[in-house]
Amino acid sequence: MRYMLMITDDGAGRIGPAEIDAQPEFMAWLRDVDSRGARHAGTLLRPPAEAVTVRVRDGRTLRSDGPFAETKEYVAGFEILECRDLDEAIAIASTHPAAGRSPIEIRPFWPLEED
């Protein structure tokens, strides 16, 4: 089953992809996930200030700059995992380097027709 780990952040110590790739604990986490055969895809997201929110109301497209919610924490990145079950997804999320600083939301995907 596929699960998305939504990595949250408060922006206080925001770093970019190069800095994350240079963190030994993150690289060790990736190796561990890959060795389990669970990692599918993942990436960092740009800061909320660069977000655009789109809504359609009465056939009109409304655009607003910024995230859809005003909140201290925001989704800073994600990992998509292929796991046996929720227990494995929880075990993997609990070892993510960000888990010690911020919550990680785990959300299952709806199964695809071919699953």
Image: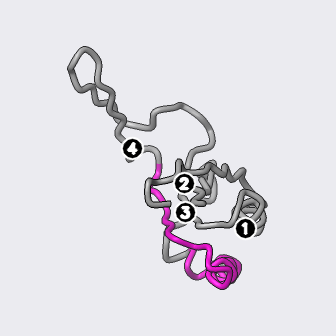
Circles 1, 4 touching at the beta carbon (< 8 Å)? no
- Magenta-tinted stretch: 20-47
Does residue 83 appear to the left or right of 91 in the view shown? left
Residue under the image location 23 percent in, 26 percent down: 61
**Mark 3 residue crowding within 10 angstroms, few (<14) / some (14–19) / many (20+):** many
Q: Which residue is mark 4?
A: 51
Q: Percent from the top left, x then y, of residue 110? A: 53, 48
Residue 73 is drawn in which quadrant? top right
Which kind of residue does numbered mark 4 sit on?
A: Ala
Q: Is residue 34 magenta?
A: yes
Q: Earlier in the sequence, mark 4 or mark 3?
A: 4
**Mark 4 residue crowding within 10 angstroms, few (<14) / some (14–19) / many (20+):** some
Q: Secondary structure at mark 1?
A: helix
Q: Percent from the top left, x then y, of residue 77? A: 53, 58
Q: Which residue is mark 3?
A: 80
Which kind of residue does numbered mark 1 sit on?
A: Ile
Query: Which one is nearer the viewer's eye here, 93 or 111?
Result: 111
Nearer to us of marks 4 and 3 is 3
Which kind of residue does numbered mark 2 sit on?
A: Ala
Residue under the image location 63 percent in, 59 percent down: 13
- Disc on res. 92: 1
Does residue 12 appear to the left or right of 91 in the view shown? left
Q: Earlier in the sequence, mark 1 or mark 3?
A: 3
Q: Secondary structure at mark 4?
A: loop
Q: How much space separates mark 1 and mark 3, taking CA atoms?
A: 11 Å
Q: How much space separates mark 2 and mark 3, taking CA atoms?
A: 14 Å
Circles 2, 4 touching at the beta carbon (< 8 Å)? no
Residue 94 is drawn in which quadrant? bottom right
